[in-house]
Amino acid sequence: MNPLISFLADKKGSPLRDLALLALTFGIAFFAFLGRLPLIDPDEGRYAEIPREMLEKGDFVTPYLNYVKYFEKPPLHYWLNALSFKVFGLNEFAARFPAALCGLLTVLATYHLGKKLFGRREGLLAAIILGTSVGFVAQGRFNIIDMTLTFCMTACLGVFLLAVREGEARKALYYRLFYIFAGLTVLAKGLIGVVLPGGIIVLFILCTRRWQILKEMRLVTGTLLFLAVTAPWFVLVSLRNPEFPHFFFIREHLQRFTSKVHGRYQPPWFFIPVLLGMMFPWTLFIPRAISRWREDRKGDAADGILYLLLWFLVIFGFFSASSSKLIPYILPVFPPVALLVARAFSASFEKEAGPLRPESIIGGVLLTIAGTGVLLYPHVIKTAKLDVVTASTLGALFLCEGLLLLFLLRREAVRTFAAIAAISLLISIIGPPLILTPLSERKSSKEMGEYLRNHAGADTKIYSLMLYDQGLSFYAGRRVILVNMKSELEFGSEQGNQSAWFIDYPTFCRQWREDKAPFAIVKNDDLATVTGDILTTKPSVLVQDKRKALIGTP
C-alpha cells in the first residue's frame, strides 16, 4: 500500500509525530507568503492600527482607532497583535501572525479532540479536513478577530466535551481549562463567549439527561476562575471610561443582534452557501456524517457526536438568526463539521470500494464545471478581476480535483480522501495569495500611507474626504482628519472635544487655503470637484489607485 494511504488508514501512531507533521504541513498553508501583500482595508487596517496605537500610547486598557475611543470589540486580538509587533516589528507579517497561528492551533486542537473522542485516525482525518478547507485557511491568513475567537471557542467547547466523558481521569484539569478558555473567548469577542457555549452545554445536558454534569462542573470555583480571566479588563475599562458599559453591552451586543444598526443584514439562509463553499468539497459529505449519528446513537461515541451536532447547530442557528452577518462569523462551526465528516470517512475506510460514490460523482462534476469556468473566465469576461495566470492556475487545480474524484469512483475511500486533501492543500497554499493580490491593489492604503510617513511633517494636516481606510493611519503612523465621515468612529467622535478632527466640507475647503502644505485623500470620482473647490494653487495628484487619490500642493 502507498505510504500516504497507509498513514491515513492506520488507527495507531505517535501523537507527537502526528502533531509535528500537521504543524509542518499546515504551517506552510497558513504562513507561506503571509507578509507579501499589503494590509487590506477596512478590517486588516483597523486591527493593525488599534494595537499600533496601544503601543504608541502605552495604554492596553482603552482601545483607540484614529486616536478616538473604539469599544466595538474586547482587547484579546489587539493584545496579541501588539505582542506580535513587538517581536516582529510593524509589518504585514506581524499583523497577520496571531490570526494565522490561531488557525493552525485550531487544526491541532481538532486533531487532539478527535483522537480523544474517536481515535487517532478520526483525529488525523478531521485535522486534515479542516486544514484543507480552503475558506478556513484563507480566513486564517487575514488579520481578523474571528480566527482568534474560533481557536478560543474550539478549545473551550473541546475541553468541556473531554471533561464530561465517562471515566475521564483528567476531569478537574479539563474543567479548569474550560473556564479559562471561556474567559478568553469573551475577551476575544464579547458575550457570545458565554452565550454560545452555555446554550450548547444546556441543550446537551437536557438531551442526555446527565444532570450530574452540573455537580461535576465546579460552578462556583469555575466562575471565579472565569472572572479572574475576564473581570480585570472589563472593570478597568469601565472605571476609566464610564460610557463603555452601555455602548459595549447594549449597542454592540443587543442592538447588533436584533437590529440592522451596522448595515450588515443578510437573509437567514446566508450562511448555507457560505459554509458549502468554504469547506467544499468536504461539505458534500455532511449528510452522510449526520446520518452516522443514527447508527451510533447507542454506541460509546453517541454523546460525543450529539455534542458536535449541537455545537454546529447552535452556532450556525444563532448567527443565521442575527440581523448582522459577515462571512467569518461561522468559522467556529468548522471544527465540529470536520470531526463529523472525519468519522464518516473513517467508517468508509473499512469498506472495500466505492462507499462514497454519490458524493464523489457530485463533487467531481461540480469541480470539473468550476475548473472549466475559471479557466475560461478571463477570456470570456473582458472586465474579469482574475488575470489569466491566476485563472489558469486555480482552474487547472479545480479541474484536476474534479477529474480525480470521478476517476476514483470505484477505488477505496482512503484514496478519494487523499486525492481531495492533496489538491485542496495545494489550492489553500497557492490560491489565497493569487486571489488576494488584485483585492489588495483595490483596497490597500500602503503606498499612500508610506508616502505620508516620508513626506508629511509633524504639523502637517492630513485630510480624508468622505472615506476612511484604517490602513492609512497604520502605514502613515499618523492621525487623519475626517471630512464628512464618521461611520464606525461616530461613538469615539462624541467622546471629548474632537471637533478639530471631524469636520464638514466647507470647513475643509477653508482650512486647506489656510494650511501649510496639507495633504488630502479624495475619491477618484470626487477629484475634479474637490480640486476645483479648494483652488488657490492647484493641488497635485501625488499617489493614485483605482479608488482614491492623494493630493497635495506642489
Image (cartoon, helix red, strand yellow):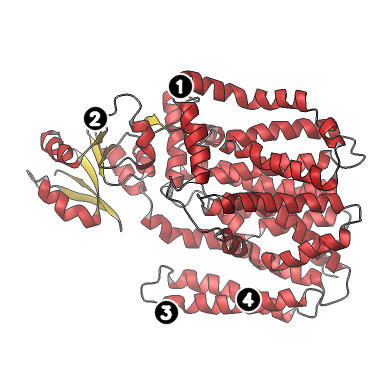
Mark before the other along the chain sequence, 3 or 2: 3
Looking at the rendered structure, the kind of residue marked 3 is His
Determine whether, in the image, residue 520 is placed left or right of residue 382.
Answer: left
Residue 421 is tagged as none
Front label number (1 vs 3):
1
> Label 1, on which residue?
242
Marks 1 & 4, CB-CB < 8 Å contact = no
> Label 2, on which residue?
500
Q: Is residue 433 above or below residue 86?
A: below
Q: Is residue 292 above or below residue 253?
A: below
Quadrant of the rendered image containing residue 487: top left
Q: Is residue 150 above or below residue 231?
A: below
Q: Secondary structure at mark 2?
A: loop
Query: Measured from the top left, where is residue 252 in percent x and y?
Result: 49, 38
> Label 4, on which residue?
400
Query: Measured from the top left, where is residue 405 in percent x and y?
Result: 70, 76
Q: Secondary structure at mark 3?
A: helix
Residue ID at (76%, 79%): 409
Marks 3 & 2, CB-CB < 8 Å contact = no
Determine whether, in the image, residue 532 is placed left or right of residue 230.
Answer: left
> Label 3, on which residue?
379
Looking at the rendered structure, the kind of residue marked 2 is Ala
